[in-house]
Image (cartoon, rainbow, N blue to C red):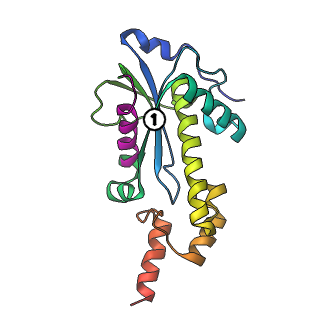
Amino acid sequence: MVQLPDPDFDARFAGSGPVCGVDEVGRGPWAGPVVTAAVILGPDAPAGLRDSKTLSAAQRLRLYDAILDSCDVAIGRAEVEEIDEVNILQASLIAMGRAVTGLRRRPAIALVDGNRPPPGLACRVETVVKGDTRSLSIAAASIVAKVTRDHEMVALSQQFPGYSWETNMGYGTKAHREGLASYGVTPHHRRSFRPVHKILVQDNYLTH
């Protein structure tokens, strides 16, 4: 049974001003950026908000459009170079901070999915484990981040068609592994991730 967010959860934090929900997508893939979203729900926010992973692609897209039309939304991201430099966890936190900073209104509090707060935010931060199943604003952020990143990976798959990114979104599926074996590592692969690093080490060994 799908757990729906508590419609009263965000209201518990709203006494001091706007509440934004923050979530990320893309910590696990071998390729592509990590993408985050921050959302301050508007009074006309759509019904049916819940964890993006429990929605079909069509449902996500419908809600995504409705969220953008009715809420204050900002996207944050960290590219593969940053991921490789600072590690995926730190890159995700940095991207979350960028999303919050990009909002039109400054939130009084950021509800962040997970148990790690982004550093340096100019507002109160509350971490919420499994927040996309508990908070409507975090659920909205999960939908926006997911659809945004999926669209980017589909676009990248047209430039690099051998890795099935249009369906696996950069995750380490069989088709992605076969693409790496056949075509090698692209500029959009995370070189610090073990399967990609292993190929780079092998290629370096074979060419020396």
Residue located at (57% from left, 64% from top)? 159
Whether residue 170 is visible: no
Q: Which residues are magenta?
A: 91-105
Name of the residue lying farthest toward the bottom: 208
Q: Neighbour class for label 1 at 10 Å: few (<14), some, many (≥20)?
A: some
On the image, numbered disc 1 is attached to which residue? 114
* Residue type of the residue flagged with mark 1: Gly
Q: For the view shown, which residue lies furthest in the top direction?
A: 15
Question: Which image quadrant: the C terminus?
Answer: bottom left
Residue at 58 percent of width and 35 percent of height:
143
Is residue 75 depicted above or below 190 in this figure?
A: above
Is 127 situated left or right of 140 in this image?
left
Q: Nearer the viewer, residue 185 or 160?
A: 160
**Residue 1 horizontal/vertical position (percent):** 72, 29
Total number of numbered labels?
A: 1
Residue 118 lies in magenta, yes or no? no
At 62% from the left edge and 67% from the top edge, which residue is drawn?
161
Q: Name the chief secondary structure element in magenta.
A: helix
